[in-house]
Amino acid sequence: MPFRPGASLLLSLLFLAAVCGLSTFLDRSSASARISAANDKITQGQLRILDSGGKPGGLCPLKNTDVKAEVSGFLARVTLTQEFHNPMGEKIEAVYLFPLPQRSAVDQLTMDVGGRVIRGEIKRREEAQRLFAQARTEGRVAALLDQERPNLFTQAVTNIMPGASVKVTISYIETLPYEDGVYEFTFPMVVGPRYIPGKTKPDDEPDDGKQATAGTDQVPDAARITPPRMPDEMRPGHDVSLEVAIDTGVPLEQITSELHEIEVDRDGNHQAVVRLKEKDTIPDRDFTLRFGVGGMQIADAVLAHRGERGGYFTLMLQPPNRAGAQDVTPKELVFVLDTSGSMSGLPIETAKRVMRLALDGLYEHDTFNLITFAGDTQILFDKPVPATKENLRKADQLLEGKRGGGGTEMMKAIRAALADTDTQDHIRIVCFLTDGEVGNDLEIINEVQRHPKARVFSFGIGNSVNRFLLDKMAEQGRGEAEYVFLNRGDQKDTEAAADAARRFYERVRSPLLTDISVDWNGLPVEDVYPKRPPDLFSARPLFITGRYTGAASGVMRLRGKAAGADFLREINVDLPESEERHASLASLWARTRIDDLMAQDYRGLQAGNMRKDVKEEITRLGLDYRLMTQFTSFIAVDEVVTAPGEAPQRIEVPVAAPNGTTMIPANGRNYAVMVTSSAATINTESGEASATIEDRRLDELPLNMRQPTELAKLAPGAAPT
C-alpha cells in the first residue's frame, strides 16, 4: 500500500525490523488500545495508570515494597511494607494482587496513615469486606488484605487523599527448605499470567469492580487472580528493596542468589546480612537465596512452646545417608510437557532439554510414554512402551516440533497421565514439566489426589512459577518438586537442566527412606501433621508439627525402609511444662492444620462451595490464631474521617510479565509485526514507497539464535532483564 513516509522512512523501517522480536499481546478486548499505549512517551522508572481505554493516566499508586527477613535456623520471620501514594488530583482506592510463599503463615498487619499506626484485626472475610466498604463510604482510610490462594493475596487501600501516602506492613513466618547442607529462602515478586479454562458464566457479574477477566464454570474467581498487565514495552513503576539477616548458630559457607545480584555483609562466622545490589530492583522474578552451613550435618531438632493456648512442637528429622546400589527393576514413567503460550521461547526450550536428558536416563527395560499439552493433548503412544532406541527417537522427534502456543488445558493432560493407574498392580512415575500458571490449580491438585497408585514429580520451569500448584501436586502425588531457572547464561542453563535430570533419577531409583511411620511411644501428643509422612527421595528433612497436652520426656521412633532394608531411628524428645520461646510454633501448627483441612475438599474450594464443616473449622483456626485464610481477612480502619464525599477512584496496580517469558497467554494470542520494504530505494520526488506488513508467531521470527528477551532490550524504555 503506497504511503508518504517523509525523510525518516528508511530509518523507521530499519528500526522496526531490528525490534521485530518485540511482541504485542492482542487481548480479547483491547488490542488496539495496548498498541497506542505503547506509543505514548513514558520514561523508564515510571508506571502510569491505564484507563478503561488502555491510555496512560496518572502515576502508579504503589511506590515501593520493602522486604526484611530474619532467619534463625530453619525458621524465617518476614516483614514487608507496601507504600501506596496518590499522585492524582482526586482520592483513590489502590488494589494490588501480589504473591507470597505458599507455606507462609500471615499473622500480622498494620497500617500507617500520616504517623498514625492502626493494628489490623482478623475477621471473617465477609465481615472484613463489609467494614472496608463502610469505611470507604464514611471517608475513612482503610486497608483490607484478602487471600485468593495460599500464594496469592489482594491488598486494597481506600480513601488515599491526593498527595498522601499510606504504608501497609504485613508479617509472616515460614519454615525454610533444607537439602544437602544448604538452606533456601525464597520471596516471590510477581504474579504470572494464569490461563483461565472453562466457559464464561452467562450471569457473571463484575467482581468488586474487576472487569479484566470474567469468571468461568471452572474458575469462578478468575477476576480476583488476574491482575492488569504491564504493556510489554514498559517496566513496573514500583521497585523492591530486600534485606535478609541470617543467624544460623553454625558456620556459614557460601551465600548465593540464583537470579539477583546481592551484597553480603558478614558478622563473624555464623551471621550475615544480605541485600539486593540494586536498590531499585524490578519485581519480575522470584528472589531465591541459598546459604550453606559449614558442610556440617544438621542434627535432628525439636523445638517446643507452651503457653496459655497449650503446647506446640516442631520436629526436623534428617533422612539417612544414601546407601546401596540403584534400584534397576523396571520402572514405568510418563513424561508430560506443557507447550502452552506461557512456555513460549526459553521456558519450553529449557523444558525440552530437561526432558531429553531424562529420556536419555531410561534403561531399555523401562517403559515410558510422552504427553504434551496446550489447548489440546497429544499422547505419543497408546500405552507405555519399552525405552528402545527407535521409541526414544520417536519421542525426540515429537519434542523437536513443539513450540509454545495456545491455552493451558492442564486437566486433560493430568487425566491422560493418571487415569489408568487405578487398575494397575504397579506404581507409575509421572513427571510434569510446566510453569503451573493456571486458574484451576485447586481442582488439578484434587485430581492428583484421586490416583494413589502414581508418584508425581513436578518440574517448575521458569523464574516466577506457580509454586503452590507444583509443590502440592508433588505432595499429594507423594513425589517431589524441582525448580529450573532461566536466563542465567547458556552454560548455566545447560548445567541446571542436567542437574535436574540427574536428581530426578537419583530420587526415583535410590529413595532415601520410604514407608515411613512414627511411633510416639506414649508421649502426650495430638493433632500431628502430616498424618501420613511422605517418602524421602532426597536429603531434605521431614518436618512434623503437632500439639502436646502435658510435660513429658521420652523417645519417639522413626521407622521405614532404606535401600530395601528396615530402618529405625530413636530420637529423644523433651516437651517442657512451660516454654515462652518459639511462640510462632503455634501459628505454624495452625497453618499446617489449615493446609490439611483444605486438602479435604480442594474441589469445593475451587468451585466456591467448600464443605460447610471444613470451611467453619478453617475459619475458626484463622480467627483463633490471627491467620490469613481463604475465609479470614485482615482489616485496619483509621478512626479519623479524612476523605468525605464521593467514592474514591479504584486503581489496580499493573504487574510485569515474569522474566524469561516471551508472551502472555491469558486467553490471548502473541504476535510480532514484520515490516519490510519492497522497493530497493525510495523515490525522492514523490516520497512514495511500498511496504509489506505481515504477522508471525514470535517463535517463527528469524532471531539468529538470539532470545526474544535479548532483542527486547533494544527497544526504548524496555526494562533490562
Image (cartoon, rainbow, N blue to C red):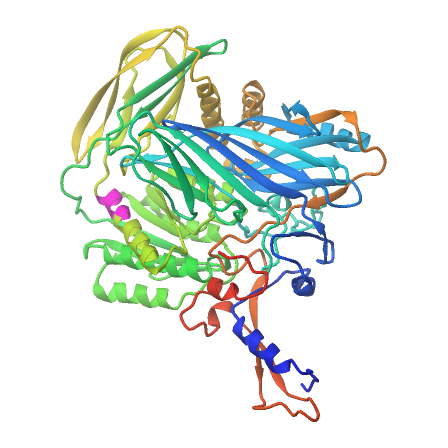
Would you say residue 384 is visible in this rendering? no
Q: Which residues are magenta?
A: 503-509
* Point 41% across, 65% down: residue: 402
In the image, residue 702 above or below residue 564: below
Q: Quadrant of residue 135?
A: top right
Question: Please, what is the dominant secondary structure of the magenta stretch?
Answer: helix
Number of numbered discs on residues: 0
Indicate the position of residue 477 as horizontal and vertical percent values.
37, 40
Q: Position of residue 661 (x, y in %)?
A: 48, 57
Residue 322 image point, x, y percent: 19, 37
The residue lying furthest to the left in this view is 324
* Front residue of this view, candidates 119 and 212: 119
Residue visible at 53% across and 71% down in the picture: 20
Q: Nearer the viewer, residue 594 or 6?
A: 6
Residue 214 against residue 275 in the figure, above or below = below
Q: Where is residue 524? Give x, y as percent.
A: 36, 10
Residues 586 and 213: in front is 586
Please indicate whether residue 326 sits to the left or right of residue 406 in the image. left
Q: Quadrant of residue 548?
A: top left
Question: Taking the image as drawn, is residue 138 in sight?
Answer: yes
Say if the magenta span includes residue 376. no
Query: Is residue 697 found left or right of 138 in the rendered image?
Result: left
Q: Is residue 678 above or below residue 282?
A: below
